[in-house]
Amino acid sequence: MLNQDILQRWHRSEVVLIGGSAGSFKPIFRAVKGFAEGLNKSVIIVIHRKKNFFSEIEKLFAENTRMSMREVADKDVIRKNTIYIAPPNYHTLIEAERIFSLDVSEPVWYSKPSIDVTFESAAEVYGQNCTAILLSGANQDGAEGMLKLKQAGALTIVQDPDEADMSEMPLSAIHLGAAHYVLSNNDIFELLKQ
């Protein structure tokens, strides 16, 4: 259920972070389709993808959204009304000047891009002007980063583990105390349309 606190913090947010792994493609695709054209926020998606696996994800997303869509490139300036997707084989970080930097260091939770890495850097730059959503996944990536975001004042939301194809990722964030709210898929999609 969406309450006033969620809605106020959502409207204050300049950036929306969405993290997911196994089982998150469908909800992320639905989110991308549902975003309003005049969202007036930047959207950054970090989804675990196999190394050297050529993906049509960007093309599919771009054909089904009303927003501008692009894969993150090093030193890209983060713009509103744009959906960015983290590229495979790099960690995506956000720098103080609100630009992206790509990092080739070791995988985190066997993943590159790592959700934790992006979430932690966003906490330092955006603080309370951020909404983070963690979806289905089979490991704990994202939980620590989400906790840092919560401590920085961001709105942190996890998908109801009962509705996630793989519940480990949202459950890890819940057990760590990183989530302000646990929302159903329908409530998450309703929020993203605001």
Image (tube, rainbow, N blue to C red):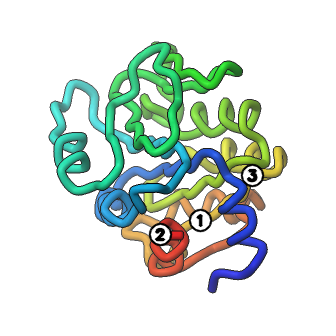
Given contact means CB atoms under 8 Å apart, are the residues at marks 2 and 1 in contact?
no
Q: Residues within 10 Å of mark 1 (few under 14, many from 20)?
A: many
Residues 42 and 183: in front is 42
Q: Nearer the viewer, mark 3 or mark 2?
A: 2
Whole-Å distance between the Cαs marked 3 and 2?
A: 19 Å
Q: Position of residue 147 (x, y in %)?
A: 74, 49
Quarter occupied by the C terminus: bottom right
The residue positioned 74% from the left and 46% from the top of the image is: 149
Q: Nearer the viewer, mark 2 or mark 1?
A: 2
Quarter occupied by the N terminus: bottom right
Residue type marked 1: Val
Q: Which mark is residue 154?
A: 3
Given contact means CB atoms under 8 Å apart, are the residues at marks 1 and 3 in contact?
no
> In which image quadrant can residue 46 be found?
top left
Residue type marked 2: Lys
The residue positioned 42% from the left and 41% from the top of the image is: 82
In the displayed structure, 80 sits above or below 194; it is: above
Q: Position of residue 28 (x, y in %)?
A: 37, 58
Q: Position of residue 76 (x, y in %)?
A: 46, 20
- Local SS, label 2: loop
In the displayed structure, 178 sits above or below 17; it is: below
Q: Residues within 10 Å of mark 3 (few under 14, many from 20)?
A: many
Residues 33 and 18: in front is 33
> In which image quadrant can residue 47 be found?
top left
The residue positioned 49% from the left and 49% from the top of the image is: 19
Whole-Å distance between the Cαs marked 1 and 3?
A: 13 Å
Q: Give the residue at mark 1.
A: 158
* Mark 2 / mark 1, whichever is N-terminal: 1
Whole-Å distance between the Cαs marked 2 and 1?
A: 17 Å
Q: Give the residue at mark 2.
A: 193
